[in-house]
Image (tube, helix red, strand yellow):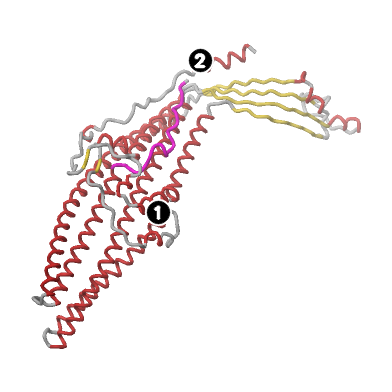
Amino acid sequence: MSKIRYFVLAPLLLGGCVVGPDYSGPPELGRAEPQPAFVRQAPGASSDEPAVAAWWETLRDPVLDELERRALASNPSLEAAQARVRQARASVHQERANRSPTAGAQGTAVLADLPGLDLQSNQGSGPAAPTTSPEQDEDTSLQFFNLGLNANWEIDLAGGQVRGIEAANALAAAAAFNAADAQVQLTAEVAQAYTNLRDRQQRAEALRGALDLQQRQLDLALERFEQGTVPAFTVGQANRALQATTRELASAEADVEVYLNALAALTGEEPGSLDPLLTPVRDVPLPPESVAIGDPASLLRRRPDIRAAERNLAAATARIGVAEAARFPKISFMGILGIGGTSLDDLVDLGNISKIALPQLQWGLLDFGRTSAAIAQTRAGRDEAEAQYRQVVLGALQDAETSLSRFAQQRRTVAALAEINRSAEQSAALTRQRYEQGVISLGDSLKAEHQRLIAQANLRSGISALTASYVAVQKSLGLGWSEAENLAPLAPAQKE
């Protein structure tokens, strides 16, 4: 028993090291280091930290809130991302279990009849002579019964299993952040589709109003042509304008159906199921007057795709240790404890207990560079993961700066369109008064009304583009997920 203790305790005393580099956090970004504030920060943007979850509630649209709720609950792509998180976390548990011994129970029954072999007289010195008598035939049968336990355990001398747990743990965290990024993409896509739907619905409504005016203008042109007061091309011009508006209306109505189908798919429902909710026309929701955007440093801490890239880098670093552990010897133990004999009664005889301990040492001293190549491969994989992390950071900063710039530009555009619309409304009102007073013709009044409708439609389209740019800002800031709703990263493996 003292020898067994020696073989068990010696590897435990030796297994105190963990090979491979320790992960020291994300790398320095050098010239790409984020600035204290966004370069393209626009007036109306606040450096206050934005609320990460449920940013769409700032648009104050209950229909949009309901769509986002349904999408987060039933979107198939999001469900697939969450399933990948569960797979990764199961892999962590599997890696941890690999460090523990394995044990099993076994039962064995051997019933054999070997003609020509005298099991009593043959002791392995040579082949037995064939038997011919019935008495000898009785000695050719063999019976053996055994019940026992077996156990196996490999000692992690170089810490390869610890590094494997670290890698699996980092990959599980990366999967969780990828699922969070899927939420960011999904919530922005739902809001964008909803904004486009409301824009097309309002556009179709405005085109129907313009179509009525153009029909009146065409009727007036026909009447004047018949009276000989206008040439024929005036009628043709009015008819072409009418047909062009009809074509635009058909396109807008088709777009409405496209976005209805898109929103149904995003919420995990069949096309047409959301029509009762979305068919009533509503205004495009306006973004708030002040928008909290934080700063670039908080962006890097918040965006889930950056955090996923950082966790992938940590996993690639841990895999170097897994590869380097192959340079060191492996010690494993197998133990067998059993009871039995040549009859069933021996299974309950405690005096027939057999014990076997089999320590084993393996050390690949000559592998013709296989281990070195594997280590070089993992180091190159770590360099690739670091470069990918830097690229994700640069892309995130570019995305945020671009979306902020477009949001600021669109705010100026909406202000100009609002002024144009105000002027068109005043002009149309004045023209109606002059027509009612008989100063101008009906045709001039209809033209002014048509210009008013065009200005109003342009303003609505500008507001839609403003809201769309606001959605892009929220997406670029990495908003729309909650760390509390995603699985928290598992604790790192403890080193021996």
* Percent position of residue 82, x then y: 45, 43
- Which element type, helix, strand or loop, lies under badge 1? helix
In percent of width and height, residue 413 lies at: 17, 54
The outermost residue toward the front is 437
Q: Earlier in the sequence, mark 2 or mark 1?
A: 2
Q: Nearer the viewer, mark 2 or mark 1?
A: 1
Residue 3 located left or right of residue 344: left
Task: From the viewer's side, name the closer residue of 372 and 103.
Answer: 103
Alpha-carbon span between mark 2 and mark 1: 57 Å
Q: Amino acid at mark 2?
A: Leu
Q: Nearer the viewer, residue 432 or 122?
A: 432
- Return the residue at label 1: 266
- For residue 481: magenta? yes
Given the image, on which type of amino acid does mark 1 rest?
Leu
Q: Is residue 101 left or right of residue 149?
A: left
Q: Return the residue at label 2.
A: 13
Q: Residue at x 75, y 28 (%)?
A: 146
Q: Is residue 160 above or below residue 252?
A: above
Residue drawn at (60%, 28%), measured in percent from left and top?
102
- Residue 176 lies in magenta, yes or no? no
Q: Residue furthest left?
A: 439
- Find the magenta span and give its range: 477-495
Residue 446: image location, x then y, percent:
16, 73
Q: Which quarter of the figure is the N terminus placed in?
A: top right
